Image (tube, helix red, strand yellow):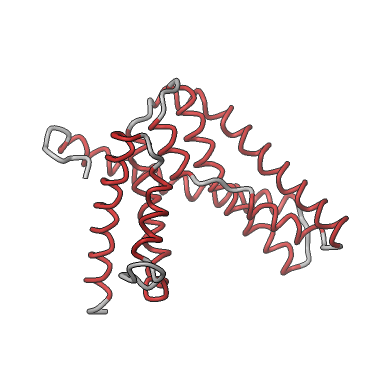
Amino acid sequence: MSDVVPVALLLVSLIIIVGFLSNYQFIRTGFPGILFLILLGFLVGPRVLQLLNPDELTEYVPYLSDLATNLILFEAGLGMNLRKTFRETPRSLTMTLTHLILCASAVSLFLHYYLGIDLLYGALFGIMVSGNSAAALIHIMRSINVKEEVVTVVTLESTLNNVLQVVSFLALIEIITTGYLDIALVAQGIAARFCVGSVIGFLFGLFWLQILSRIKHERFESM
């Protein structure tokens, strides 16, 4: 445990520094930040400078990726107009559901008819590849000059996509393991997960509003 904390703090600090440099060079040069990060990772990796060994960082990846995604979504939420967000939510949800269903159906049918894979397993794989990176999309949308409505729709769609993808994946896993398909039960399970997540998100949102209202005039409040 004594070794984990310093390494985690060091990695978080490096992520903040690299993220700042990536964003700064994008503003100055227009070179995509994602490509910059890929090149930087290749440079410090085991093939060139050999400064970092990926095997030693594997155990930290899930925690750091979740932290980075939460920070990006949190920052994106701070910059969204609440009224426009509620207005664009039905459109974003429709886009997300359509994308998920079409992708899962297309992949499932393709794998079934061309490779003989069971439809449920094909749908499971389709759900896996249907996701998009909310972090990447939000960063790109904030970096280009588009209407605020477009930014709101894409941000909501990418966020809902990740949520629906995880919930649908877990529901399909449950169907495959139990061998029992009950549409009403599956819908109830998905609704229950969404309700629990919504309540927790709402309560933490109120908590953060209290904090932000107190520090909004302080320096570096965004940190």
Task: Choose top left, top right, bottom left or bottom right for residue 47.
Answer: bottom left
Q: Is residue 54 above or below residue 90?
A: below
**Residue 80's spot in the image, x, y percent?**
38, 29
Quadrant assignment for the N terminus = bottom left
Query: What residue is drawn where x is 65% and y is 39%?
Result: 97
> In the shown orientation, is residue 162 left or right of residue 203?
right
Q: Is residue 220 left or right of residue 85?
A: left
Q: Is residue 155 above or below residue 172?
A: above
Residue farthest toward the front in the current orientation of the protein? 48
Classify 11 as above or below 37. below
Left or right, 94 with reference to 158? right
Residue 28 picture location, percent across and down: 28, 34
Outermost left residue: 218
* Foreground of the two, 214 or 153: 153
Q: How many numbered discs sit on the rendered protein? A: 0
Q: Quadrant of residue 176?
A: bottom right
